[in-house]
Amino acid sequence: MDKKSLKYDRQREEMVHRQIESRGITDPNVLLAMRTVQRHLFVSEALMDQAYGDHPLPIGEQQTISQPYIVAEMTQALVLNKDDRVLEIGTGSGYQAAILAEIAFRVYTVERLYPIFVKARKLFDELRYYNVVTKYSDGTSGWSDESPFDAIMVTAGSPEIPQVLVNQLAIGGRMIIPVGDQYTQELVKIFKDEQGIHKSNLGGCRFVKLVGEYGWREL
């Protein structure tokens, strides 16, 4: 292993220890995934040395790769099992999908920005994430042909919870979605059972806008 790879391995371990474990993330599958996925490969070469910092980073097209802790928090909140089928709305860099793919059986991820979609798909293939299925489309509509899903993660801020996504959630399914205005949101967890949906608030967050038919209409 070369020096650069060793450096990133050390940074990744430090990220998990200082930013994630110390803030209460305890799911062993999530911690292992965060230790395994090479976050620096999901950003531009110019930003690789910042990849393991405690902050989001730009990935182009006015989009970002989320802060590592937020990725871990949202993943833990889904309480994933190894046989789960997960829908992700907003592929972005592909990092969150890779984390999900380390834990779940299959990840279906939808991206509306074509340059980002192409780049993420290429990276999934290079890293052999063959259990990640990608789609270039308006993510706010979900992926009805593959529903229902055991879990749904929305990685952009929505003005409200799209009912079309709730409809694609299996009984016993969980969904995580940032809900609020264009600047700040609350991270909402939804659990669906025979009686309906149950919501809980996981705290404040800030994401780029969820743009689409069932999200924000304008850029």
Image: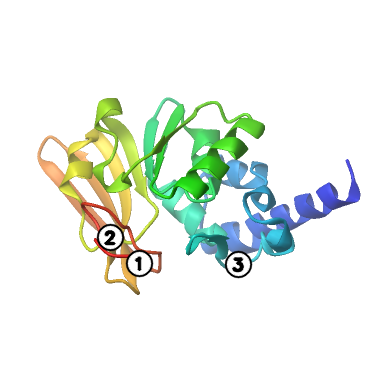
Disc 2, SS: loop
Q: Is residue 19 left or right of residue 212?
A: right
How far is mark 3 from mark 2, CA to CA?
24 Å
Disc nearest the viewer among 3 and 2: 2
Q: Which residue is mark 2?
A: 158
> Which quadrant would the C terminus be assigned to in this image?
bottom left
The residue located at (65%, 63%) in the rendering is 18
Looking at the rendered structure, the number of numbered marks drawn on it comes to 3
Identified at 27% across, 64% down, the residue is: 218
Dividing the picture into quadrants, the one containing residue 106 is top left
| Callout 1: SS | strand
Residue receiving disc 3: 54
Q: Residue furthest front?
A: 115
Label 3 crowd (10 A; few <14 / some 14-19 / many >=20): some
Mark 2 residue type? Ser
What residue is rendered at 60% in x and 47% in y? Answer: 34
Q: CA distance from mark 2 to mark 1?
A: 15 Å
Q: Name the amino acid type tagged 1.
A: Gly
